[in-house]
Amino acid sequence: MGLFTLEDMSFEIDRDDKVEPSLSDMTRAAIHLLHDDNPGGFFVFIENENIDTASHLTDIAALLGDYREFDRAVGLAYEFFKKYPRETLIIVTSDHETGGLGFTRALKELRSVESGNRVAATVDDLKKIQSISLSLRKAAAMLGPHPTAAALDKLMTDSFPGFTLAPDIRDAIIGQQPLSRTLYRDHTANALGMMVANNTQAYWQTSSHTNHPVFVAALGVGAERFRGYLDNADFGKTLKALLEGNQTR
């Protein structure tokens, strides 16, 4: 057992590698410890909860950082599969979707819906996401429960260079008010998420879970059992049958 924090582990974008291991570090250790000198095989469940948490905070920069880290963990599992293809099953999925994130066309300003007032993301806009160096959770903590105008201006200058903060979003942060009926989980983080969206066209439908179907990828022994559209409650039953050696059930 390895416990590295009393609460949630840091987003990858905020992580201090001298204090906390990465998901790929822990995945590598888990595979090593569970496989070596263990002829009976093993089952390992690897989750990056921060992908969900970042989506609740409508934080695309933190989301992408942890998604990439999850991809590295999947890569380690795939390297293991290549060594033992006849004995390994890898499943990659999610229990639900959060946020309804999408890159979409939007209005530059609310004054008009004419085509000249519409904008889509450019490469430069998307590069702005890569320039963000901290999570919105950390940014909200820096501002505190009662953000001031001066502290907000300093945060924008120091941490979001090139980004513009619209007056309504500024007022929502200082007044600690939700921006909409669906963006309410963290007033400061969700407002900053809308600020990032306004600058990059990466918009969120909600700060909660959605009913969108999620992608499932399966590779190896029994992978054919996970094709098509499945209810997530069936995953446990199918895995149990495979572990019991029932290939046809």
Image (cartoon, rainbow, N blue to C red):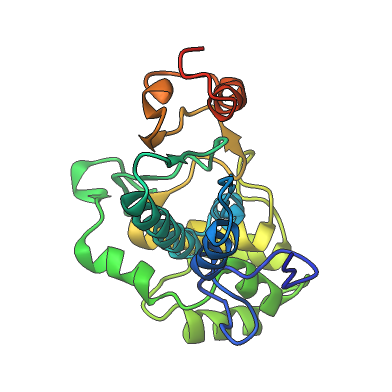
Residue shown at 40% from the left, 60% from the top: 76
Q: Is residue 148 visible?
A: no
On screen, 94 above or below 84? above
Q: How many numbered dots are placed on residues in this image?
A: 0
Q: Position of residue 113 (x, y in %)?
A: 30, 40
Q: Is residue 71 above or below residue 249?
A: below
Residue at 80% across, 69% down: 6
State left or right for residue 118 relative to residue 204.
left
Say which residue appears at 51% left-offset and 79% top-offset: 156
Q: Position of 4 compared to 83: left or right?
A: right
Q: Residue at x 57, y 77 (%)?
A: 15
Closer to the camera in the image, 174 or 221? 221
Taking the image as shown, residue 130 lies to the left or right of residue 49, namely left
Question: x, y percentage for residue 176?
Answer: 72, 61
Query: Between 228 and 197, which is closer to the camera in this rendering?
Result: 228
20 sits left or right of 23 in the view: right
Instruction: Write down the quadrant of residue 130 in the picture.
Output: bottom left
Give the quadrant of residue 50.
bottom right
Quadrant placement of the N terminus: bottom right
Q: Is residue 93 above or below residue 166?
A: above
The one of 193 and 5 positioned closer to us in this rendering: 5
Q: Position of residue 119 (x, y in %)?
A: 25, 52
- Tell me where residue 63 appears, x and y as whole percent: 48, 58
Q: Is residue 200 visible?
A: yes
